[in-house]
Image (cartoon, helix red, strand yellow):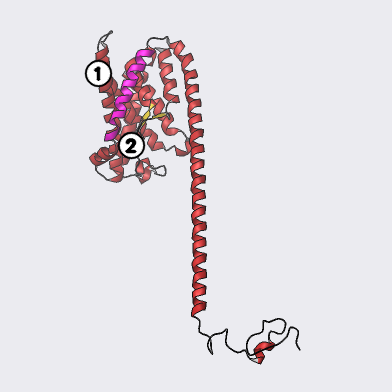
Amino acid sequence: MPIKMKTEVPILNDKAQFKSLPPAARLAVAVFGMVGLLLLIVSTRWAGQLDAAHFGLMLFLAVVTAHAKVRLIGGSSLSLLTTVVLMSVMMLGAEAAVLVSVCGVYVQTAFPRRRCIPHHIVFNIGMIALTVLVAGKAYHWMVRGFHPFTFDELVGSLVASLIYYLGNSLCVSLIVALSTRRSMFRLWHDNFLYTAPLFFLAGLLAFLVSKLIWSFPGITLMVALPILYLSYYSYRVYLRSLESEKTHSAEMAELFNSTLSTLALAIDARDRNDSRIHSQQDRTPHPGGNEENAPASPARCRDHLEYQIPVSGCRFDYGAP
């Protein structure tokens, strides 16, 4: 499958337009598109010589695993489409694997429709077709004869995985470097070098599963695998619901903590304001000395005829005329 970088670059930005790319990047997209079209035409000539049951099975797996990933320890993820493509290389040959990989990458790139960008599809199809063809030829050069040794098949799967990894990572690094005018080697080293073990793991998994598949008739697998996929899909939905519930709980806890922090700040601000007001009142000077001992004038007393506690120097009764 095409590797996707985590960094923001025009070739992988959903809002990027083909006309906005540099001329060298547009030329690279066009070249990869023509190579992909040529390899598709050549590969379809071999379609009539394939085992229809196993070929149909691989196409089905490529479609349903286009967006499927298995999360590993450390935050990494293993693309199941990579495993399916390498299985096709081992079971059906390079040309059939090209058709399977193009089908899977098209589904992966074109759906969902809101993220579909035509020049991404063109580049990815050309890149994956060229990579899979070279990886397939290398595998079958390592594994010769009608009854190859298991060790030869294992070594061949590792070689195919290596070529598949280099083809993906170098091609994506090339188009990103042309789009951003950055160093291709630096992009590859910083973003793709650490993904190599995942491709070797996918190759080993493809080797083991291909050995298992040959033990069963194709029709049996075509009946059993949809059931297994339904079980896998149900498990994914269950995990997604748990993740959503966990995220919601974390958001509510964060909101609660934020509310408590805001309330604490408001209470603290009110206390500080009250302290400042009291401090200002204590420092305010009163004419004639202390206000408690200052005599009140008659005019001041008349203004409070309704009710007033008698003060020194002015005595009146409630309701006095």
Q: Which image quadrant: the N terminus?
A: top left
CB under 8 Å between discs 1 and 2: no
| Residue 153 image-quadrant placement | top left
Give, as a single range, the part of the protein colored magenta.
Answer: 193-212
Which x, y percent locates residue 251? 50, 45
Instruction: Locate residue 153 relative to residue 68 in the image: left or right.
Output: left
The residue sitting at 43% across, 13% down in the picture is 53
Q: Earlier in the sequence, mark 1 or mark 2?
A: 2
Q: Which label number is shown at residue 29?
A: 2
* Residue 260 coordinates in the image, percent (x, y): 51, 53
Residue 91 in the figure: left or right of residue 318: left
Q: How far apart in space, not on screen, are marks 1 and 2 (Cα)?
A: 33 Å
| Secondary structure under the numbered disc 2 in the rendered image | helix
Residue 155 is tagged as 1
Seen in the picture, residue 274 relative to 214 is either above or below; the reply is below
Near mark 1 (Cα within 10 A), the count class, few <14, some 14-19 or many ≥20, is some
Say whether residue 130 is visible. no
> Along the line of sight, which residue is nearer the eye, 54 or 179?
54
Disc 2 residue type (three-letter): Val
Q: In the displayed structure, does residue 291 sit left or right of residue 109?
A: right
